[in-house]
Image: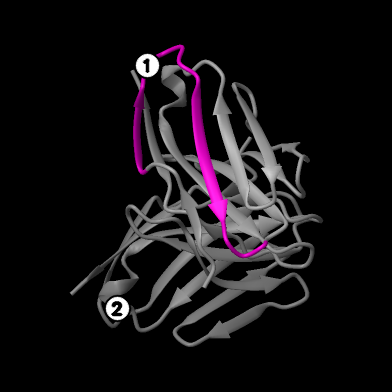
Amino acid sequence: DVKVTQSSRYLVKRTGEKVFLECVQDMDHENMFWYRQDPGLGLRLIYFSYDVKMKEKGDIPEGYSVSREKKERFSLILESASTNQTSMYLCASSLAPDSYEQYFGPGTRLTVT
Amino acid sequence: DQQVKQNSPSLSVQEGRISILNCDYTNSMFDYFLWYKKYPAEGPTFLISISSIKDKNEDGRFTVFLNKSAKHLSLHIVPSQPGDSAVYFCALVFGNEKLTFGTGTRLTIIP
């Protein structure tokens, strides 16, 4: 069974803080993804990675960066958190290159005050 | 500009009846289509998919229909059960593995 875990279920941070969201998958998947989910907007892709130390911008990368030092771990970084980054953050992984099915973690509800 | 739209934010269906969820897209280059289901406090889980060379795919109570000329995708659930109450997202693929998700439809099955 594929397992994708995220470091926190709920997080409250102050404006201007640096925030780290961690994601770990245990199935040796090549690809990893970070999304945010907002009401009425669905899931929007922030960043993704096809391999260790590789990263690609998604549709809404502004205000975020990522790190992938190990295959199983993909971190999302908010360099200076702002209130408009209050959202549900979802991490996913998939087995490249022919699988479109992505496996999601449970999500982190981030509130920036 | 939203490339993938689910025009019904919510849908209520009587238990045992058919649930029909719809998804419209604008880019005819999408070549693979998926449906995901999401319960509260959980991540989305894959439900069913279809490639652009087909117009129907069935898996138990779930059937996905693709109308390429209308750029329309639909998910039929029959018979609907209380456990089907969730948010459903369509997700479309073009070329690489990047998924473009729809806005979601909250389905409520009324016992």
Crowd band around label 1 with a 10 angstrom C-alpha radius: few (<14), some (14–19), many (20+): some
Report the residue that reaches farthest toward the top: A16
User: Is residue B32 left or right of B80 when viewed as pictured?
Assistant: right
What numbered label is drawn on residue B100?
A: none
Q: Residue at x 35, y 59 (%)?
A: B39
Q: Amino acid at mark 2?
A: Gln
Q: Residue at x 49, y 47 (%)?
A: B103
User: Is residue B17 left or right of A15 when viewed as pictured?
Assistant: left
- Which residue does the numbered mark 1 point to in the structure image? A14
Instruction: Identify whether B74 is placed above or below A89.
Output: below
Q: Nearer the viewer, residue B11 or B50?
A: B50
Q: Which of the 4 quarters of the picture holds residue A86?
A: top left
Q: Nearer the viewer, residue A58 or B20?
A: A58
Q: Nearer the viewer, residue A96 or B39?
A: A96
Q: Which of the 4 quarters of the picture holds residue B69?
A: bottom right
Q: Reply yes or no: does residue B40 show up in magenta.
A: no
User: Can the viewer see residue A59?
Assistant: no
- Tell me the subunit letter for badge 2: B
The percent coordinates of residue B66 (x first, y second) are 65, 70
Magenta span: A9-28
Q: Amino acid at mark 1?
A: Arg
Q: Quadrant of the C terminus of chain B?
A: bottom left
Question: Marks 2 and 1: same chain?
Answer: no
Q: Reply yes or no: does residue A13 show up in magenta.
A: yes
The percent coordinates of residue B1 (x first, y second) are 63, 35
Q: Which of the 4 quarters of the picture holds residue B106?
A: bottom left
Q: Nearer the viewer, mark 2 or mark 1?
A: 1
Instruction: Identify whether B6 is placed above or below A85.
Output: below
Crowd band around label 2 with a 10 angstrom C-alpha radius: few (<14), some (14–19), many (20+): many
What numbered label is drawn on residue B81?
A: 2
The percent coordinates of residue B46 (x first, y second) are 53, 67
